[in-house]
Image (cartoon, rainbow, N blue to C red):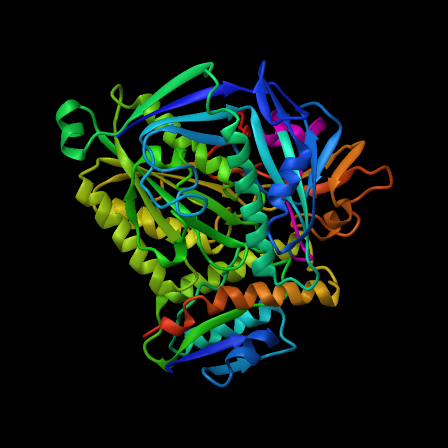
């Protein structure tokens, strides 16, 4: 399976009379977009704002971030099984508005989270401050059920991303990247001396505000399976996860999974990247047993020498992570796990809710309990009052001058467990 | 059914007490629910759902619902390890910041989330 990603660089976003891409600028026809998103009967009103890198803007509470993409050649469409038919994607050519994103904001429940600051200290912690963001502010109809509200916001973001993606369909990309996954036996034939490596991606799948969808199927109702890495780049996996802002995987993360990107970079050089196993993170321990058993069996069946395992979320998924790690190691396969930490404000406490001596190669996205101060912003998109009821916020989080004292866990993507963040550590 | 729901969430109690044996502890804190479950595990009940279900943090939500087996058998050390780690984790969060005094509307949102976490799959649990 071969996919070309055509990146169209976007350096600016502006409102205009027609939605189009011109001179590296995304022009947004606000009325047309609002009409499209307002089709959903669950939404009472829709507004659109723009937020660019360096502007004094705080967006909160952030639900999802989505990169606009469009299929130009090959079967299926972006977000298969959700916005388009369930055709298998991941082959042909896809155009990407690189540097642009759709951000959805809205208060599904009273305690909510997710901050993107476009400048200042907070901006350094989130990769989305570097993007030209089109922000959808959606107000639901009165007395809407949280499940319907979450779904309406999720669909609004995806529809907007698809809408903007289409503007890039006939644009010549600034760069074209090429990715190929061969059938397993051919891949082994091609690189007989390289160690075979797979990626195990764990998907949040626990319930309301904690869900992920694979080709439109709720991941908690799936069994671990194989998926080609290029399918992820075409939106085969989307986020319905609105909890744990710092370490949830937004749809943007799924489309740009850095572990997939890095494994591809080493493919054919140091390793033979043979594929991706996706598995879930359910509440029931029997589900955890079943899924980790299957995941380890699939890794063994592929005959890999090593796997990278990434987690999503806090607490309960720590157990899935350790089960996966332990069972895969017991098959004689080396593992590296990618997680983040809730190690207390001084970073001295135990980081995970589960552990095992076999988990001896760990990459961390950072300590989500770390306290930071965010300067006031001139403009708030969304609702700042919620910061006092935000995860990692606390009474008095909002200071008199509008600055915020919060834990890192409030910042969207700050300790992302795919490594899509900029935190690092220094040895002394 | 061969299971017991232990909960301090009235929505879970209202939704399930007629179908599943439910131990409703309306005045228990999140941590007290976990500690009671630990005691049950010591007595040989099996842990069926993860105590830290959901990514809502233990110092955010006051509500917790956990399912254990009705049958008692030899104590499972694996289950004991999970519940002890969960209690340690919850205490760590509460040491950072105690659970705020939420409005009734927000409390109800937390109840709905907790209910959603527990109801997914409860009907197709066969053991």
Residue A139 visible: yes
Query: Which is more toward the observer, B117 or B65?
Result: B117
| Quadrant (top left, top right, bottom left, bottom right) of the N terminus of chain A | top left
Q: Which residues are magenta?
A: A109-132
Q: Which residue is located at x 78 percent, y 48 percent? A: A385
Q: Relative to A383, say whether A183 is above or below.
A: above
- In the rendering, at what x and y percent does residue B4 appear? 45, 79
Q: Is residue A117 magenta?
A: yes
Give the answer, above or below, for where A334 lies relative to B78: above
The answer to which of A84 and A237 lies nearer the viewer is A84
Residue B1: x %, y % from top left: 38, 83
Seen as rendered, the residue at the extreme bottom is B18
Q: How many marks?
A: 0
Question: Image point 81% across, 31% down: which residue?
Answer: A378
In the image, is A422 to the left or to the right of A14? left
Spot the residue most to the right: A400
Q: Give the x, y percent position of residue A113.
A: 65, 47
Q: Does residue A367 appear anywhere in the picture?
A: no
Quadrant in the rendering for residue B122: bottom left
Residue at figure coordinates x 49%, y 70% from the top left: B66
The spot of residue B10 in percent (x, y) is 61, 76
Question: Quarter holding the C terminus of chain A?
Answer: top right
Q: Is residue A135 above or below residue B97?
A: above
Would you say residue A245 sits in the magenta stretch? no
């Amino acid at each position: 399976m071969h996919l070309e990603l055509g990146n169209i660089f976007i350096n600016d976003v502006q409102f205009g009379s027609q939605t189009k891409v011109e001179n590296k600028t995304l022009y947004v026809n606000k009325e047309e977009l609002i009409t499209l998103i307002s089709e959903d009967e669950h939404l009472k009103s829709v507004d659109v704002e723009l937020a660019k890198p360096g502007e004094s803007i705080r967006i909160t509470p952030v639900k999802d971030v989505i990169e606009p993409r469009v299929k130009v050649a090959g079967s299926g469409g972006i977000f298969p099984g959700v916005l388009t038919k369930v055709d298998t994607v991941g082959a042909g050519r896809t155009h990407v508005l690189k540097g642009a994103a759709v951000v959805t904001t809205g208060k599904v429940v009273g305690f909510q989270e997710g901050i993107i600051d476009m400048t200042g200290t907070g901006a350094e912690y989130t990769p989305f401050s570097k993007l030209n963001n089109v922000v959808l502010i959606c107000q639901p109809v009165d007395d809407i059920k949280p499940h319907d509200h979450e779904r309406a916001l999720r669909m609004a973001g995806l529809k907007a991303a698809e809408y903007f993606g289409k503007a890039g369909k006939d644009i010549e990309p600034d760069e074209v990247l090429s990715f190929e996954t061969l059938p397993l036996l051919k891949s082994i034939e091609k690189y007989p001396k390289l160690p075979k490596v797979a990626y195990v991606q764990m998907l949040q799948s626990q319930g309301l505000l904690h869900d992920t969808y694979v080709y439109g199927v709720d991941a908690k109702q799936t069994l671990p399976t194989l998926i080609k890495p290029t399918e992820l780049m075409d939106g085969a996996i989307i986020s319905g996860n609105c909890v744990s802002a710092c370490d949830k995987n937004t749809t943007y993360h799924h489309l740009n999974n850095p572990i997939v990107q890095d494994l591809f970079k080493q493919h054919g050089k140091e390793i033979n990247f043979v594929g991706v196993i996706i598995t879930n993170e359910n509440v029931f321990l029997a589900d955890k047993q079943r899924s980790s058993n299957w995941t380890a069996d699939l890794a063994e069946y592929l005959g890999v020498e090593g796997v990278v395992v990434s987690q999503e979320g806090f607490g309960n998924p720590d157990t899935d992570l350790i089960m996966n790690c332990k069972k895969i190691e017991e098959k004689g396969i080396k593992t590296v796990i990618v997680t983040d930490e809730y190690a207390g404000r001084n970073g001295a406490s135990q980081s995970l809710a589960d552990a095992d001596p076999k988990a001896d190669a760990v990459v961390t996205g950072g300590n989500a309990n770390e306290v930071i101060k965010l300067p006031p912003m001139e403009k708030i998109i969304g609702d700042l009052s919620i910061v006092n009821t935000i995860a990692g916020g606390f009474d008095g989080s909002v200071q008199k001058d509008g600055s915020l004292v919060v834990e890192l866990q409030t910042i969207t993507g700050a300790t992302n467990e795919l490594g899509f963040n900029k935190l690092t550590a220094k040895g002394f | 059914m061969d299971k017991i729901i232990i909960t301090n969430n009235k929505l879970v109690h209202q939704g399930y007490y007629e179908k599943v044996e439910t131990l409703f502890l309306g005045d228990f804190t999140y941590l007290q629910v976990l500690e009671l479950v630990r005691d049950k595990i010591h007595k040989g009940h099996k842990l069926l759902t993860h105590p830290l279900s959901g990514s809502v943090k233990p110092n955010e939500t006051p509500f917790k619902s956990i399912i254990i087996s009705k049958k008692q058998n030899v104590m499972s050390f694996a289950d004991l390890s999970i519940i002890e780690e969960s209690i340690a984790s919850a205490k760590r969060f509460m040491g950072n910041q105690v659970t705020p005094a939420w409005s009734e509307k927000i409390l109800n949102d937390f109840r709905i989330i907790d209910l959603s976490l527990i109801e997914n799959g409860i009907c197709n649990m066969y053991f």
